[in-house]
Image: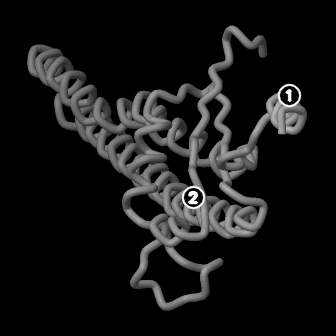
Amino acid sequence: MTESLTRRISIFLSLNEENVYNYFNQHDPAPLYKWQLGNEILDYITSSISSAKRSSLIQFKVICSRAADIKFADALMHAVKRHYMVKRAIKRSKVDRFKRRSFKILSVSLAIVVALQATYSYLFTNEILHETFHNGLEVLTWVILWKPIDKLIFNWNPFLKELSTMDKLITSEVIVIEKHKNKIPASELLSVTMHA
């Protein structure tokens, strides 16, 4: 896919030893790597990916203040990816239930239509009644079958989009950026040492 068609969505997370616990549910008694994520980070991720398309690429950029804070990045990203793996499993079970239910409704509707058609052909021998009830039965057939067919054809897209977005979050690239505070560039450092 070309870069012009693919939209890259970056989710920025600033991380240091003091704020790492703000990303998690502080009431969770489990060890750090198993902690549940807090509502703030989930809301932030959800708002960041709200405009994601199926062709979008999602990546996390974790900005660490010191080299020692990089160890927290693994725990945080493990928690994020685990959270979306659980959400994806729940969504997949909902999709499976949706498919089973829709096909059951469609098969029951078809059985009713077939039973009505069979009963209709045996009951009405009078031609005028036959034509009247035939038209009414066609309308009833479309009314019975409309909702299951509509669900099966048109209601898939939201499920597929959510599953696709969760898959992208689980397999997304994680870029850890080490940002030093008060770091002097090499050219300025050279000029400082020369003037000293």
Viewer-closest of 93 and 120? 93
Q: Residue at x 19, y 36 (%)?
A: 123
Q: Where is residue 56 in the image (x, y as percent from the top left)?
A: 63, 27
Quarter of the picture containing the C terminus is top right
Q: Where is residue 130 in the image (x, y as percent from the top left)?
A: 17, 21
Q: Nearer the viewer, residue 146 or 72?
A: 72
Residue 137 visible in the current orientation = yes
Q: What element carries label 1?
A: helix
Task: Calculate the distance from the C-alpha at mark 1 to the C-alpha at mark 2.
Answer: 45 Å
Residue 147 image-quadrant placement: top left
Q: In the shown orientation, is residue 30 left or right of residue 126?
A: right
Front residue (pair 127, 10): 10
Which residue bears the numbered disc 1? 187
On the question of residue 125 being in view, the answer is: no
Please report the residue visible at 57 percent of the width from the left and 58 percent of the height from the top.
84
Q: Is mark 2 on a helix, strand or loop?
A: helix
Return the disc, 1 or 2, that comes first in the chain's sequence. Answer: 2
Tell which residue pokes out farthest to the front in this image.
196
Which circle marks residue 60 in the picture?
A: none
Amino acid at dot 1: Ser
Question: Which amino acid lies under the numbered mark 2 shown in the image of this protein?
Answer: Tyr
Q: Assess disc 1: are there few (<14), some (14-19) or many (≥20) residues with their C-alpha within 10 Å of its C-alpha.
A: few
| Quarter the N terminus occupies | top right
Image position of 135 with respect to 33: above or below: above
Between disc 1 and disc 2, the foreground one is 1
Residue topped by disc 2: 84
**Residue 22 sits above or below residue 130 on the image:** below
Residue 178 drawn at (x, y percent): 75, 49
Residue that appears at 42% across and 79% down: 26
**Above or below: residue 30 compared with residue 123:** below
